[in-house]
Image (cartoon, rainbow, N blue to C red):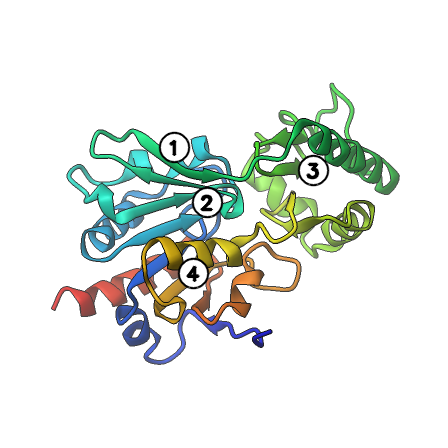
Amino acid sequence: MLKPIVHDWNEFNLDLSIAKSSLIAFDLDNTLACSKKPMLKSMAESLSKLIDIIPVAVITGGCLELVKKQILNMLTIGTNLKNIHIMPTNGTSYYRVNNDMSLQSVYEHTIDFKQAQCVIDAIHKCAKNIGVWKEPGDPMLWGEQIENRGSQITFSALGQLAPIEYKKTWDPSGCLKAQLAQSISQALPNFAVRAGGDTSIDIYRRGDDKAQALRMLSQYCDVNIEKITFIGDRMYPGGNDYPTAFTGALIIKVSNPSDTLELCNKVLNILEI
C-alpha cells in the first residue's frame, strides 16, 4: 500500500502542480461550500471557469439532491457541463450531466434492504449506548438522524437539517464522533465507517470510498491517477477524504471554502495564460 501523502493548500508552488493535472476533484461540504449551503457566487464563478478548461469532479458524502442545490444550480450559465463528474455518497454513485441539466447514471452501488436494516439497527443501538440518540420532540433535533441514501447510510447527530452554528459547537474536539464511529465500525465489520461533516458519520460497503471513486474516474476518463488532483477538508485518519491519500493522486487539504477559492483562483491564473 502507498504511504499517505497530503499537501497543505498554501504549500509553495502547489498551484503549478495542480495546473498540470488532467482532472481536478473536490469534496463539497466545507471545501466548495458551507455545509448544506449553496456555493457562494465567487466560488461558483471560479469553479465554472475551471470546468470550462479542465474536467472537474465533485466527490461528496452528501446525496445527489444536495449536489444539485449546492453546485449544479449555482454554475454560470453556459458552463461546459460535459466536463463535470458528479459522485455523491462518497463516490458510491456516479453521474454525468447533460446539456439540459439532466443527469445520466454511470453506476450506483446500492446497499440492499436487508443490509441497510442491519446498518440502521447498529447505528441506533450504538448512538443510544453513547448517549447521542435523540427522541422526536427534542429541541436540539432538526430532521431525521438516520438517512438511507441508497449506496450509503448517514447518521447526523443533530438531524439532517441542523443549523450550521449548532453543528460547529456540538463536538468541536471530534471525540464523540470518533467514539461513535469506532462503536459502529466494530458492530459492522463489513462496512466502512467514516466521519463526514461536523456532526455526521457515513457508513457504506467497505471499499466503496473516495479512493475507489478516484480509481473509477481514472478508468472512465482514461487518465493516469497520478494526473488527478483531489481537494478536501477531512484529511485525517477516519475522515471521509483521507482514503484518497493512499491513491498516488495529488491530495490537498483545505480548511474551508475560502482556502479552496484562493487556490482555484491561483490555478486559473496559470491555466488562463
Q: How much space separates mark 1 and mark 3, taking CA atoms?
A: 22 Å
User: Is disc 4 placed on a helix, strand or loop?
Assistant: strand
Q: Is residue 1 visible?
A: yes
Q: How much space separates mark 4 and mark 2, taking CA atoms?
A: 15 Å
Picture residue at 61% right of the left edge, 64% below the top: 236
Choose the circle earlier in sequence order: 1 or 3.
Answer: 1
Residue type highlighted by circle 3: Ala
Residue type highlighted by circle 4: Ile
Q: Is residue 38 visible?
A: no
Q: Which numbered marker is on residue 157? A: 3
Per the image, the residue denoted by label 4 is 231
Choose the circle earlier in sequence order: 2 or 3.
Answer: 2
Question: How many neighbours does mark 3 have within 10 angstroms: few (below 14), some (14-19), or many (20 or more)?
Answer: many
Position of the N terminus, as image quadrant, is bottom right
Residue type highlighted by circle 2: Cys
Picture residue at 61% right of the left edge, 42% below the top: 167
Is the C-beta separation of discs 2 and 3 under 8 Å?
no
Per the image, the residue denoted by label 1 is 69
Q: How much space separates mark 3 and mark 4, taking CA atoms?
A: 26 Å
Q: Position of residue 128 (x, y in %)?
A: 84, 35
| 255 versus 35 height, above or below | below
Per the image, the residue denoted by label 2 is 34
Question: How many neighbours does mark 1 have within 10 angstroms: few (below 14), some (14-19), or many (20 or more)?
Answer: some
Q: Position of residue 26 (x, y in %)?
A: 41, 54
- Residue 183 in the figure: left or right of residue 48: right
Residue type highlighted by circle 1: Lys
